[in-house]
Image (tube, rainbow, N blue to C red):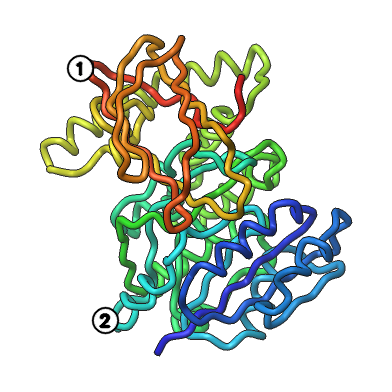
């Protein structure tokens, strides 16, 4: 029977740590857990205290960085299947039995990865991680299409490539995937949604600045042998898309890059259609997030703090939908672009919403929140 070794690195994100730990309580599969805290000053001890019985190893104090902490955790813990999840991210329930079964039934597979969602700080759905695709070693060197918390790998493959690079701050996961690929490791992409990733301005990814871009350039130069790293343009566009306040220059550049991306996306959609490849994810277009027809929203929900109402904002503002919430069906009309849903009760720690418009038109999910605007 395969066992899991899971590491949670944390530094001053203790207010979110409970969701990562709570999600591990709902895996229904044995695992060993290390929580590696870098000397947080935001109430780490209080956050972790209700979960001490499930933690096999814990450290708190100054360290040499996130990657070093993750590597140390893997070295300390026993386990055949490895994964790490940042303290502000969390798993969907029941992920581990699925992953363990795949590794058990496919001994030739070294790395398994799936889909993920982006959520707000209060755990509400923002979007699906749009870049996940079937494994392609060449494409991996210019686009990190594997979402880190939605990826698991064998210890044997990890040890064979020399483990995680402790010198990297922002791209230790992407570097690890590339080294797996170079070594000849076998990857498997599955359609299951495995993890939720919080996005907010203070996250390390969105606040990395120049050092992060230098690490991105290093990946493409080292593994793609490109002197000019083209992928940097895409990463910069992605960062701008999450930036609430842009300068005039950033706004103009963002709109320019968006138009280029739209043209490129249209070409790719045309090619995918003729190659019978999927260009949407649960009804949402991977290229621009729009939906044409029905779409599905899935998000894990832990704890008892379920808002009395959820507010779903869409565009265009005047639309009618057939709605299904955890298998309960109904009909709703938007009120100035907002759908108000009362008393959603999670089923098996998940909330699932299916929206099917009555009109034949493209539409976009703008926000799914438990807070009224």
Residue appearing at x 70%, y 46% in the figure: 211
Q: Is residue 162 left or right of residue 359?
A: right
Give coordinates of residue 160: x percent, y percent. Answer: 48, 83
Q: Is residue 161 left or right of residue 295?
A: right
Give coordinates of residue 175: x percent, y percent. Answer: 53, 61
Q: Is residue 43 above or below residue 335?
A: below
Residue appearing at x 22%, y 16% in the figure: 359
Cα separation, mark 2 vs mark 1, equals: 43 Å
Q: Is residue 181 above or below residue 197?
A: below
Residue 153 falls in image quadrant? bottom left
Residue appearing at x 65%, y 71% in the figure: 70
Residue count near mark 2 (Cα–Cα under 10 Å), binned few <14, some 14–19, many ≥20: few
Disc 1 target residue = 360
Q: Nearer the viewer, residue 295 or 143?
A: 295
Residue appearing at x 32%, y 77% in the figure: 101
Say which quadrant the N terminus sits in: bottom left
Asked if the residue at tag 1 contacts the one at tag 2, i.e. Cβ–Cβ closer than 8 Å, the answer is no
Give coordinates of residue 188: x percent, y percent. Answer: 31, 66
Dot placed on the residue nearer the N-terminal end, 2 or 1: 2
Q: Is residue 168 left or right of residue 348?
A: right
Disc 2 target residue = 105
Give coordinates of residue 199: x percent, y percent. Answer: 60, 41
Q: Mark number for residue 188?
A: none
């Amino acid at each position: 029977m395969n066992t899991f070794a899971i590491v949670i690195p944390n530094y001053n994100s203790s207010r979110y740590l409970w969701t990562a730990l709570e999600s591990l309580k709902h895996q229904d599969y044995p695992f060993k857990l290390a929580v590696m805290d870098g000397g947080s000053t935001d109430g780490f001890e209080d956050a972790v205290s209700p979960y001490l019985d499930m933690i096999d190893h814990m450290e708190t104090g100054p360290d040499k960085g996130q990657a070093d902490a993750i590597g140390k955790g893997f070295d300390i813990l026993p386990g055949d299947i490895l994964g790490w999840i940042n303290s502000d991210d969390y798993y969907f329930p029941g992920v581990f039995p699925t992953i363990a079964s795949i590794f058990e039934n496919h001994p030739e597979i070294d790395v398994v990865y799936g889909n993920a969602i982006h959520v707000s700080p209060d755990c509400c759905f923002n979007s699906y991680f749009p870049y996940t695709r079937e494994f392609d070693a060449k494409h991996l060197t210019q686009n990190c299409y594997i979402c880190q918390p939605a990826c698991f790998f064998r210890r044997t493959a990890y040890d064979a490539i020399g483990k995680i690079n402790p010198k990297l701050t922002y791209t230790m996961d992407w570097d690890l995937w590339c080294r797996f690929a170079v070594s000849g490791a076998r990857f498997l992409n599955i359609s299951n949604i495995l993890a939720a990733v919080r996005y907010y301005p203070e996250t390390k990814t969105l606040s990395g600045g120049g050092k992060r871009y230098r690490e991105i350039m290093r990946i493409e130069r080292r593994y793609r042998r490109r002197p000019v790293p083209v992928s940097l343009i895409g990463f910069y566009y992605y960062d701008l898309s999450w930036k609430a306040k842009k300068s005039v220059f950033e706004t103009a550049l963002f709109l320019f890059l968006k138009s280029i991306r739209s043209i490129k996306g249209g070409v790719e959609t045309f090619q995918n259609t003729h190659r019978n490849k999927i260009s949407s994810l649960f009804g949402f277009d991977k290229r621009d997030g729009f939906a044409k027809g029905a779409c599905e929203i899935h998000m894990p929900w832990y704890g008892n703090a379920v808002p009395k109402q959820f507010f779903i904002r869409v565009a265009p503002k005047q639309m009618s939908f057939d709605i299904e919430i955890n298998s309960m069906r109904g009909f709703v009309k938007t009120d100035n672009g907002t759908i108000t849903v009362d008393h959603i009760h999670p089923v098996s720690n998940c909330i699932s919403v299916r929206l099917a418009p009555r009109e034949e038109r493209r539409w976009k999910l703008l926000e799914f929140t438990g807070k009224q605007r």
